[in-house]
Image (tube, rainbow, N blue to C red):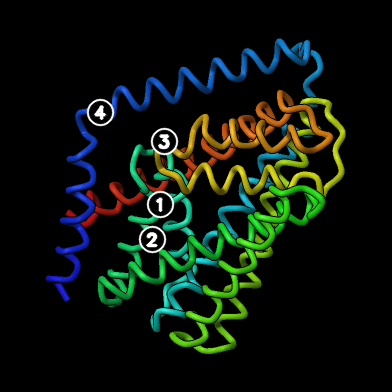
Amino acid sequence: MTSTKIDFIEVSNRIREAIEKHRGAIMLFALAAFVAGIGISAQALDFEPNQIDWSAIALLIPAAFFSILYGAANMQLMARCAGVRISAVKSGKTASVAQFAEFLPIPGGALVRGEALLNEGVKAGQAAAHVLVNAVLWLGVGAAAAGWAIGTQTAIGTILLASGLVACLACVLWLVKNAGLALAMAAFGIRLIGLVITALRLFIAFKAISMSVEFFESFPFAFANILGSASSLTPGGLGISETIAAALATITDINPAAAFIAVGLNRFIGLILSGTLTLVLLYTSRQKVSEIG
């Protein structure tokens, strides 16, 4: 078992080493693009700080926390599909750290989840497969919902809906074969719940910048958030999710500048919360180690 864990760690280290010399440039570029995009979007909207709805900002915090709870439940279910069990405490820690790790210029969240499965005794290849299928299912659910919201009267809406449904079907069939029908349907169901939570966060984020949208209209931007984070080209998809959201907004009734700001605001709140929880977890872990020592 030790060898499989070492293999997974070695792969992670090679990825880190390959981009180490470019990390600073990637971070600066992503941050510059993000800040510039926010500035340009605010100017395009004639947005003023006094237009911020602070009650909606306050709602974003518990909504982001629910995302971490959802991530913990999803981690437990993924472990069940892989044939092991992870405690609620461990899955909660994994979900928080994994969400924060998405802001590294590598697929940090995937590595954290993979390591969590390895620590419970799942073989490296099996852990990687479950993490990958789980991620594709997440993208598929988001794409299908975005396509449905945009509408099949447009080519992009049709493509997103069709490709999302195909991805969902393929992942569910794989899970049925490898984990059983009940767990496969549970995995699909929990991803639907996650999509609703993500869409709700963006719905609130639009409210926070005094933009009124219908709830179902936030699904394309939820997909943009998912797709950007999955790309791992920049930390947490920083700048990418917002750009995708603005592009999708051009085929809806939503102002692209508002979409950019709403997705960025949602990301910022999520980063602050997951970062704070991760720092608390790291501090408490070190305290326990020092007490044992």
Point out the tag, 4 or 2, that comes first from the N-terminus.
4
Q: Is residue 124 above or below residue 110?
A: below
Residue 266 in percent (x, y) is at 64, 36
In which quadrant is the N terminus drawn?
A: bottom left
Return the disc, 1 or 4, that comes first in the chain's sequence.
4
Distance of label 1 from label 4 (alpha carbons):
20 Å
267 on left or right of 231: right
Q: Position of residue 163 (x, y in %)?
A: 61, 61
Alpha carbon separation for disc pair 3 and 4: 12 Å
Q: Amino acid at mark 1?
A: Gly
**Amino acid at circle 2:** Arg
Q: Which residue is mark 2?
A: 113
Q: Say if mark 1 contacts mark 2, CB within 8 Å.
A: yes
| Element at label 2 | helix
Dot 1 and dot 4 residues touching (CB under 8 Å): no
Q: Which residue is mark 4?
A: 22
Q: Is residue 123 above or below residue 14?
A: below
Tell me which numbered mark, 3 or 2, is placed earlier along the sequence: 2
The residue sitting at 41% across, 64% down in the picture is 132
Residues at marks 1 and 2, CA–CA distance in whole angstroms: 6 Å
Residue tagged by mark 3?
Answer: 235
Three-letter residue code for mark 3:
Pro
